[in-house]
Amino acid sequence: MVRVAFMVLVFTGSVMSKNKCSYHEIVDHLNLTRDSDKFKVTRPVTDHTHVTEVQLDILLYAILAVVEKSQLFVPLLWATMMWNNEYISWDPAQFCGITRFTVAENLLWKPDLFIFEMTQKEDSPLAPFVMISHDGTVTSDRPIKVISTCEMDIYKFPFDTQTCNITIGSNQHTRDQLRLVPFSNTSLATQFSRQMMRTQGEWEFIQLSVERTNVSLLELEWEQLIYSFTVKRRPLLHVINFLVPILFFLCLDLSSYLISELRGEKLGFKVTVLLAISVLLLILNDILPSMSNKTPLIATYCITSFALMLLSLLVTIVVTYLMEKDLEWREKRPSRSHWNSDVKEKSQPSGCLNVCDQARSDKEHEQLPSTEEVQVNKEESLLVQIMQELQQLQRTVDVHISYREEGRKFFRWARRINQGFFIFYITTVSVFLALIYIEWQS
């Protein structure tokens, strides 16, 4: 019995000594060295008719930048690729149960996948290792900083939503050699991306959709995966910097109608407001791209506000001119002393006539010393004098009214223009703001 136990221990020890518990032993078993071209020179299949299936998973890790001026979308992605290398296999039971381990990526063949929208050289963090499994599965995980072009629609800026595509495909291997399979569908990719998101900044991540397409050229067909990233802008910063100040300037320009046109401050005030709008337009020009299919609503908002203020300035200039014309007519109008002198000059003959009549009445009184006749003559002469003075006063009042009516017509025109444009201004601004708000929210 003791002898049998001893033999079992010796046999077990010999088996244990034969087991390999080192990664290097597996590398030697596979002959996976830098000098071995079998693993990296060509597509790793034992028969050229075999198709290499690459499972690809792209998740959004961070939104680094969205540049509207140059139409660039810069995300940080986490890319996972899995494919099968038919030259790699081992029995885990012979190597202490080791099922997978990492090796340098330059020892193995990798799919020649690239991003079609890439505009600059990739400067992603290095990931020098890949994971290999005992069944030949090779897994590559790495972050990728993508600087890609994106056609943006900025019509509703800053309440816009952008969709940028990243197309991934093989450069040389056609569909009968390499197949691309998305590891996650649209719902899973969106869910995992939201869980992995670290920074979004101005943009809010909405959805990540995955689409599989084929591209044909010269009777050859390639397979591609299109990842569409939908992001929505957070508009608070632009609302505070652009929309609200322009609305304040409109209110200030509207309140300037409470300032009298006879004072120069109103014209200078409107010019200052107009210059402030011009500064905001220059800042906006640095943000929006030079080319766009449609004029952005914020540009329409700024230009219309600028045009209304410019029209208001022109109306103020016209009203001020009419007021000055009214003042000139007032200065040309004859003064009260001039009218009085005219009255006196024209009333002198009547006074002389009264004196002559008085002298004549005295003579008659000497000839006819009747008391009743003298009294009647005096009353008649007094009535004639009063009538002549009233006629002269009527002529003077007529001259005064004619001068007044001729001068005040400029004032009436200015007041009508000012009141009419004020009503037009309020109506136009109210309708315009309501329409542009509806368009932004649609």
Image (spheres, grey):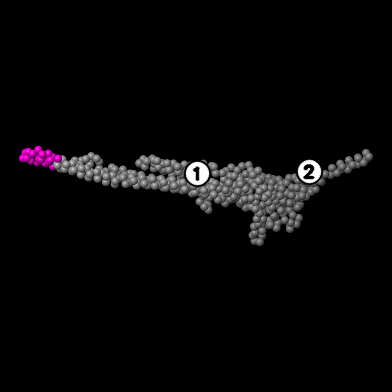
Name the residue that disc number 2 marks.
22
Looking at the rendered structure, the secondary structure element under dot 1 is helix
State the residue lying farthest toward the bottom.
219
The quarter of the displayed image where residue 50 is located: bottom right
The quarter of the displayed image where residue 96 is located: top right
Q: Position of residue 439 (x, y in %)?
A: 52, 49
Q: Which residues are magenta?
A: 352-379
Does the rendering let one see residue 8?
A: yes
The kind of residue on which mark 1 rests is Leu
Tell me the number on the disc at residue 106. Answer: none
Q: Is residue 124 left or right of residue 424?
A: right
- Which residue is painted at 93% across and 39% down in the image? 2
Q: Is residue 423 left or right of residue 78?
A: left
Nearer-the-camera pick, 101 or 426:
426
- Which residue is painted at 52% across and 46% down in the image? 287
Looking at the rendered structure, the secondary structure element under dot 2 is loop
Q: Is residue 397 left or right of residue 110?
A: left
Nearer-the-camera pick, 189 or 255:
255
State the residue lying farthest toward the left.
367
Nearer-the-camera pick, 31 or 92:
92
